[in-house]
Image: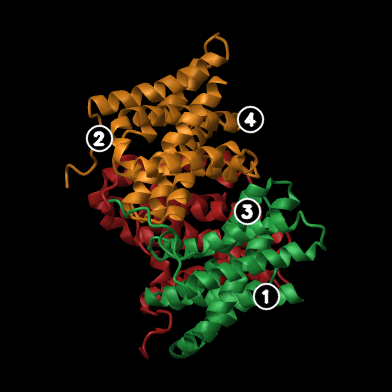
Chain colours: A green, B red, C orange
Amino acid sequence: MFYFTIDILGTVAFAISGVMVAMDKRLDIFGVFIIAFVTSVGGGSLRDVLIGNTPVFWLQEMVYPTTILGAVVFSVVFRDKLKYVRKSLFLFDTIGVGLYTMVGVQKGLAIGLSPVMCVGLGTITASFGGVIRDILCNEIPVIFRKEVYATACILGGIGYFLLEKLPVNEAYPYVGGICIVIGIRLLAVRFKIALPNIYKAI
Amino acid sequence: MFYFTIDILGTVAFAISGVMVAMDKRLDIFGVFIIAFVTSVGGGSLRDVLIGNTPVFWLQEMVYPTTILGAVVFSVVFRDKLKYVRKSLFLFDTIGVGLYTMVGVQKGLAIGLSPVMCVGLGTITASFGGVIRDILCNEIPVIFRKEVYATACILGGIGYFLLEKLPVNEAYPYVGGICIVIGIRLLAVRFKIALPNIYKAI
Amino acid sequence: MFYFTIDILGTVAFAISGVMVAMDKRLDIFGVFIIAFVTSVGGGSLRDVLIGNTPVFWLQEMVYPTTILGAVVFSVVFRDKLKYVRKSLFLFDTIGVGLYTMVGVQKGLAIGLSPVMCVGLGTITASFGGVIRDILCNEIPVIFRKEVYATACILGGIGYFLLEKLPVNEAYPYVGGICIVIGIRLLAVRFKIALPNIYKAI
């Protein structure tokens, strides 16, 4: 129930980020819905396709299209008010990123992949929805240019495998990994920490 | 035989739409062929990958590459004459959209998906070939910006499930769904009906 | 061991080509790594997904992420010196293209596809990493616009099936196919041979 709530909050936050990018591009209502949908479920879909876990997860879960449709209607109607909830949205988004990273890690473990690949799958799950969103909107993906986003996923995934070596209940590494992702992302935004600039010398 | 003829006409119409977009971008002959191919089979491929129906359908059907190659050669050679058959092409394209929607719906039913997901798969089958075409040509997909195209697919899919509840032969809902897609798209173009504009207030 | 060496050289060359495109776009270090990774393994991943050969090949091979990470670090650090090894990189890249074409052909044969489809799979394996790289960097894929690249793959694949009809050891057609791809690409670059221009008359 706890995970389900996070999942829905994350889905809503991702969908709204899709709506905002799509409306910037002045897409029609169908386009806005598709971009919202892809932003929410695109990362998990790519993960499922790469590991052969098909049909992909959302095809059997009515909760995703329903939630996303609700989020789209809400954010199209109240688009002028979205700025007042921007902080909540950022928080939901960050919590969603944390959860999705761990979901991806678990899916990798379930088919016996190595920790490095599990961390990769977690990062794909959490970040490639946004990549596909940006590609469909004809932009270079924002996570390739700025934002300590994927880095938080990678460190959270590594944290999971370190915590998992400790003699603790199996829920701790999972929740710990989520907290690491959230913590790093909040700190990075708060203190404007970015990846090292590799273009300085040029 | 009847369905096979529609399928081929649709494949040809989709391929020619790919050729036209690719030639606008001045791609070379290989690029033109790939764009034509992807426009024709991309939607069905994405559907097959999402439901795990692999190898994807065209890998075992020589008729698709052969037909598409023929359509590419024809439309490159006669490109100055294509405008004279524009109406026929639009008709073939529309018929293809109707058929592909129903093929997608059937594939969803075959693996036990719910009606909503079947309609989604039908829409993906009919419209994502064009989405991938536009992405490869570095354009925002045209169906996200205008055209009552995906809407026709969705309504046709819903029509199928309504007709299917009636005590009629099983071929009727299938053909009925195709006719609804065709009818809505023709009416929308004839009377210039578009989706409601969500940007008016801005 | 021989094939493994070629594979690694090809992976390195593909990764470096990804780094160069990504740095042109001024992506951050994470984006550079992802583009390098996708350029190297994207073609093979698309092939595996289309034929249902999942989990895709690199998820169980640590050698790919390790090699690509090494290539990225090397080429970011020595980016000003890369021009001195440009010829070696072109050669590695060309050898990689040859090998990947044959790997794709073999994967198609293994699931009983027809020769035409096997050649298609080989071409996808060798060339779609670059297509995905260009899409993620918001460019029209370079192989759709110039370069006798895919043509070399196609002819190499056809060469394999012709050689395979001869009464020779089974390694010959394989190596012969690789040599045809390499030979055609080198000749095309040396003599500036391009595909026939289909826009002359316009």
Give the number of the mark in front: 4 or 3.
3
Pick the front one: C78 or B9: C78
How many angstroms separate mark 4 from mark 3 (CA)? Answer: 31 Å
Question: Under tag 3, what secondary structure?
Answer: helix
- The amino acid beneath tag 1 is Ile
Pick the front one: C36 or C190: C36
**Dot 1 and dot 3 within a common chain:** yes
How many angstroms separate mark 1 from mark 3 (CA)? Answer: 20 Å
x, y percent for residue A136: 43, 63
**For mark 2, what is the residue?**
C196
**Outermost residue, left side:** C201
How many angstroms separate mark 2 from mark 3 (CA)? Answer: 46 Å
Few, some or many C-alpha atoms within 10 Å of disc 1 (few <14, some 14-19, many ≥20)? some
- The amino acid beneath tag 3 is Val
Question: Under tag 1, what secondary structure?
Answer: helix
Identify the mark at residue A6; answer none if there is no mark.
Answer: 1
How many angstroms separate mark 2 from mark 4 (CA)? Answer: 34 Å
Question: Under tag 4, what secondary structure?
Answer: helix
State yes or no: discs 4 and 3 in contact (Cβ < 8 Å).
Answer: no
- The vertical placement of C121 against A109, above or below, is above
Residue C21 seen by the camera: yes
**Dot 4 and dot 3 within a common chain:** no
**For mark 3, what is the residue?**
A119
